[in-house]
Image (cartoon, helix red, strand yellow):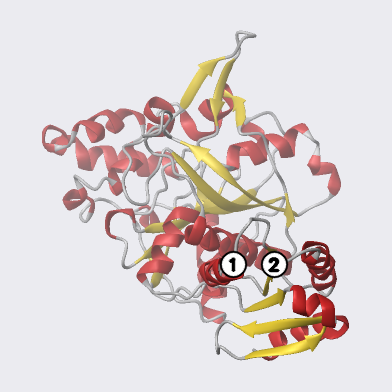
Amino acid sequence: MAQYKKFKGTQDIFGEESKYWYFIENKARDIFLKFGFKEIRTPIIEPTELFKRSVGEATDIVQKEMYTFEDKGGRSVTLRPEGTASVVRAYVENSMINLGSPIKLYYMGPMFRYEKPQAGRLRQFHQIGIEVFGTNTPISDAETIILADELLKSFGLKNYKIKINSIGCNKCRPKYKEALKNYYKPLLPDLCEDCQRRYDTNIMRLLDCKKDKQYAGDAPIILDHLCDECKSHFEKVIKYLDELNINYEIDARIVRGLDYYTKTAFEIEHMDLGAQSVILGGGRYNSLVEEIGGKGTPAIGFALGIERIILALKKENVEVETPEKIDVYIAYNGEKTDIEALRLSKRLKDEGLRVFLNISDRSIRNQMKHANKVKAQFVAIIGETELKEDTVTVKNMVTGEQFEVENYWAPQILKEKILLE
């Protein structure tokens, strides 16, 4: 029995599972580059105050879920619970505003929240996200949603729904919050403990509470309380999406769980994932850069959860090819065949083939079994006879066909065979 075990809510990713990560990360990079984004990598640890200021002191994340500790220098440090705050901090600290606008950035990496582990909800989870700085136009909101849609389509997903809303701005939101308070006040005794607490600290979060969702249907909707600017902005976003034939629905209950959002907010739900159905979420945050010490800069972004995307891929039975596919397994046995096997391995790799060279003391029979286990497409065999005749015996592990080739031509012939498969 293992002496040390991983923490609850974390996972080891290996074997067949790792192919999903490779697939998602590479598809995402391809799409982001196509849309003109550049990668940013930020530290996993950040000053605790950054998340209190950005995410919001009244949020569940800050109050209940952050991994926070004091380092040896007496500083309060937090493992990042989400990606946007760190990217905004990097934008401000590195004066990216001087690089011109808009700035388009994408990121990938682990996040940490102390939550009750369940399917699609872990304590160490992984996000892929984008942030766009320096533009407040409705077309940038529309392009962000279009990008999210194209990204999910590139994964091969189909059974999802885009939901959008406007949550107003600092001018129109106070009146809406007042209307919400008036609606929920007589219901307070019947609300769950979290909603009773949020009534004073974060009233809009009552709309997305799963325990008290029966009350949200009759609650005032923010679209009826938008100022002229926010209303016009949202109408243009919808127009762009309609023109591009993007399927969406307007959902007035979408408020997102973080304090920094303004105007457009959106979520994408997968129909087969039950309670953890939101696989991607985002929105506009025009005040956050200034809130953490930068010059006022409008911005918009989104993030998806890799673990939830993997659950969705499995639910839809999306075929994901393994990146660790072995083109040629080199088996050898006999005096001096090991040297020739090393030479052949290098020549095959120089041709761009993926090669698994046997490095264990196995018989040819056991090497063939191992080649089958690692799912090699071909096996190149060098025994004493092949060494003497300067040949290689090749076996197609899919069809069972076996033939001999001259050693000199083996890399070229194998490459041609693999390209034809």
Identify the residue under disc 2. Answer: 333
Percent position of residue 101, x then y: 79, 53
Q: How many marks?
A: 2
- Specify the amino acid type for callout 1: Gln
Rendered position, 115 above or below 52 = below
Image quadrant where one finds the C terminus: bottom right
On residue 420, which mark appears?
none
Counting residues from the start of the chain, the first of labels 1 and 2 encountered is 2
Q: Measuring 48% from the left and 62% from the top, which residue is drawn there?
A: 16
Identify the residue under disc 1. Answer: 367
Q: 199 left or right of 284?
A: left
Instruction: Tell me how far mark 1 sits from mark 2, CA to CA.
Output: 10 Å
Image quadrant where one finds the N terminus: top left
Residue 47 picture quarter = top right
Q: Report if the CB atoms under discs 1 and 2 are less than 8 Å apart.
A: yes
Percent position of residue 360, x then y: 64, 55
